[in-house]
Image (cartoon, helix red, strand yellow):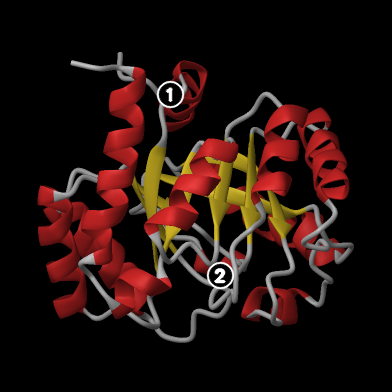
Amino acid sequence: MRNSLYETLNNRRQRGQKSLAVLLDPDQLDEAGCRHLLALSETHPIDYFFVGGSLVMNTHQASLIFFIKRNSPVPVLLFPSHSLHLDTQADGILLLSLISGRNPDFLIGQHVVAAPLLRASSLEILPTGYMLVDTGRQTTASYMSGTTPLPHDKPSIAACTAMAGEQLGLRLMYLDGGSGAMYPVAPAMIRAVREAVEVPVIVGGGINTTEKAQAALEAGADVIVVGNQIEKAPQFLAEMSGVIQSFNAVLDPV
């Protein structure tokens, strides 16, 4: 029997292997761009497509997921900001609980609305503690959620937040600087969260160079997420895929 998405990810974490996810915003990616990205991913492997955004304004999400599923074996995980953004074509959903904020709608409210739909679907549900981190400017995620991000220089707050999320039963932790972050989540914060919890740690936002990606991985990120930079420079995918493969090759040399 094939492992679930979570089992695969957690097994990789336990072995020290790293993963690469590409975040696709349906508002920003057309079919031509998606076709080019899928062609690149055949040469420069990635592990996951995350589909969604803080403000999905058009109807492209369904067609985007359909196109990916028809043309790529890479698992597709929903990255929703609202219960309206569910799509049963995907393989799974990062069921985000915004534990860095105190807005009840994003802690549990949207989840109540989505629960019957998720129960009836075949989506694999991955309960995820979502933590917005201050990275130099207000992001769409912080504005839309009406929450204050975690201070970038307070790793202990992030560690305790993640610890509480794990104790509540959340199975993934996601540290996110948000779209258009001026700088990435600090390695000290990633390291503090990695040491505080046993679950896989995902890190995204502001990772726009190989040096920043390497720093996040060395600090303990199990999955790094890239998005905006690939939309601006698709060749960046080759660089990120190379970083992941090089890191994993050191752990498991041929």
Which quarter of the rendered picture does the C terminus lie within?
top left
Q: Would you identify the image quadrant in which residue 219 lies?
A: top right
Q: Amino acid at mark 1?
A: Arg
C-alpha gap between disc 2 and disc 1: 31 Å
The structure residue drawn at horizontal position 45% and vertical position 17%, both measured from the top left corner, is 15
Task: Tell me if I can see residue 25 in this picture.
Answer: no
In front: mark 2 or mark 1?
A: 1
Which quarter of the rendered picture does the N terminus lie within?
top left
Q: Nearer the viewer, residue 103 or 175?
A: 175
> Looking at this rendering, what residue extends furthest in the bottom direction?
57
Left or right: 47, with 191 as reference point: left
The structure residue drawn at horizontal position 41% and vertical position 85%, both measured from the top left corner, is 58
Task: Tell me if I can see residue 11 in this picture.
Answer: yes
Residue linked to disc 2: 84
Q: Amino acid at mark 2?
A: Leu
Residue linked to disc 1: 12
